[in-house]
Image (spheres, helix red, strand yellow):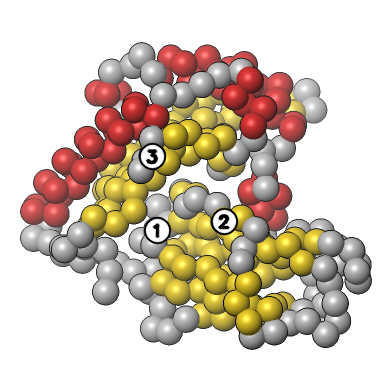
Amino acid sequence: MGVWAGCLGLLLLPLLGGRLGVPAEEVLSQVAFVQRTLSSEEPSEFMFDFDGDEIFHVNLENKTVSWRLPQFQEFTSFQAEGAQGNIAVLRSNLDILMRRSNYTPAENVPPKVTVYPEKPVSLGDPNMLVCLANGFSPPVISLTWKKNGQEVKAAYETDFYPNTDNSFRRFSYLTFVPNPEDIYYCEVEHWGLAQPLTKEWNTNMPEPLPETAENVVCGLGLAMAIVGIIVGTILILKSRQNNDEAHFRRRPL
């Protein structure tokens, strides 16, 4: 089974900023995607991110805006109805693309999975396990935690974060208290996998952070280091609400 087609919309807005006195170009991205099989529509998403870190996403079912850091609500707002309009345009374009491709299925790319603690492990000290699924497509995936073979509920799971190669990544977090007798598993299901992929973690395993450590840390909340450019972000968010849909650039997955 797999997605027959998907459509991804991107709007990239450069912000000029600097870190440690060195000029740099930051990027504020508006990301939206829709996808479907021949028989049904699959989950869609609309979000804004800053340099790959989520600012907010829109719950398209109940038309609410969820901010990654609550502090952003003190400076600006976003109307969920605007996201609905973008999604409607993408769905229309997707129908056209499916017909033009003669309903050719999209490729299912399996995820790479890493499990590790959010901070150095100390027995008895509460911590957070992170399960990162990265580089997969389409953005339909299941992440399940198990402790000593028994399923446990995740503390939090992020939305789908886009990569530059049009693949996606997703994080799932599990609160835990390190105990040498406990074994944790993150079980991943995806259309690109012939069977569920299971990654184990226990207190005897090494703790090197993956190459995406920067994204992982920010996955728990935007770093306060970007507060200095919040004003620029706010101005762009507000201006976007008044812009015409014609300025929205789209490209197929």
Residue at numbered disc 1: 139
Mark 2 element type = strand
- Per the rendering, the mark at residue 62 is 3
Q: Position of residue 27 (x, y in %)?
A: 54, 31
Q: Earlier in the sequence, mark 3 or mark 1?
A: 3
Q: Quadrant of residue 109?
A: bottom left
Q: Earlier in the sequence, mark 3 or mark 2?
A: 3
Q: Is residue 206 left or right of residue 83?
A: right
Q: Residues within 10 Å of mark 1 (few under 14, many from 20)?
A: many
Q: Is residue 164 left or right of residue 123?
A: left
Q: Image point 78% across, 23% down: which residue? A: 21
Q: Is residue 102 left or right of residue 32?
A: left
Q: Position of residue 160 (x, y in %)?
A: 47, 52
Mark 1 element type = loop
> Which quadrant would the N terminus be assigned to in this image?
bottom left
Residue at numbered disc 2: 157
Marks 1/2: CA–CA distance: 14 Å
Relative vertical location of residue 212 with respect to residue 96 in this rendering, above or below: below
Q: Are marks 3 and 1 in contact (CB under 8 Å)?
A: no
